[in-house]
Amino acid sequence: QDSPAIYYPSPISTISLDKGLLSICNSLGENSTNALSVVIAHELAHYYTDHTFCTDFAFAISKNNTELSDKLKLLSKTNAQKLAIETEADQKGLFYACIAGYKPFNMYPKLLDAIYASYNLRDTNNGYPTKQERKDISLMAQKKMEQLYNTFLEGIEANKNEDYDKAIECFESLNRIFPSRENYNNLGVAKTRKALLYKVATSEDYNEDYKFKKRFEYPLEVDINSRLN
């Protein structure tokens, strides 16, 4: 195929990868899987954010209303909309790759250069971010990750200080952007510890060596490490 990767929304949602892309990723050595994660996550971002709604809808109604179908197809391909869609896919794709445990940032510029060279792509393509803009998107996403990591540390500290409302606020805000398993765990710990404060303790079920009641036997462990790091 002429593209390193394509997402087909219909009739069955499919991501197609070119063998040439796999060769490019393999050439990056220890970063091969990190590179591949960037491309797949970009295409997954199109799927999860329903970027092809107009195309899907047009496909579904084409037999019944060809005029509306043609209008929807035209709308979905306007340059301004396409630019916004591809920018969002780049941004969210980098986050998806990180949530999955990969490290996409350091090798992202090198991957772009290799793809553009191998597929003879122009640095500027109508309706898409330029190659430099895509590199800038990566830098902005990385800065956003650093900000989110600071929020993660604030949540950890708030949990430690028994400020559970603050901890809940931190981890809920993280999960709106970076819904990772450690954030969900820490959010659950904060909510559970807050709930335990409402239980009236008696001399039989309270142990002075611990903050919480002996009869609550589930482990409550905070994850201090994050993929945001």
Image (cartoon, rainbow, N blue to C red):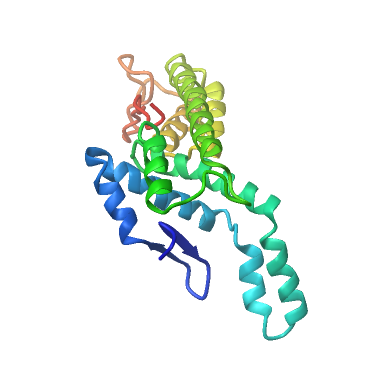
Who's the residue at 46% across and 61% down the image?
6
**What is the count of numbered marks?**
0
Residue reaching furthest to the left: 29
Residue reaching furthest to the bottom: 63
Left or right: 26, with 159 as reference point: left
Residue 104 visible (yes or no):
no
Closest to the observer: 64 or 81? 81
Residue 41 visible (yes or no):
yes
Who's the residue at 72% across and 62% down the image?
75
Residue 117 vertical placement versus 78 (above, below) = above
Query: Residue 55 sits in which quadrant?
Result: bottom right
Closest to the observer: 56 or 131? 131
Who's the residue at 25% across and 45% down the image?
27
On the image, the x and y values in percent for residue 154 come to 49, 18
Left or right: 209, with 189 as reference point: left
Closest to the observer: 189 or 41? 41
On the image, the x and y values in percent for residue 214 come to 32, 27
Who's the residue at 46% across and 54% down the image?
44
On the image, the x and y values in percent for residue 38 come to 40, 45
Left or right: 185, with 66 as reference point: left
Residue 129 vertical placement versus 195 (above, below) = below
Residue 37 vertical placement versus 210 (above, below) = below
Looking at the figure, which quarter contains the N terminus? bottom left
Closest to the observer: 217 or 125? 125
Looking at the figure, which quarter contains the C terminus? top left
On the image, the x and y values in percent for residue 177 come to 54, 37
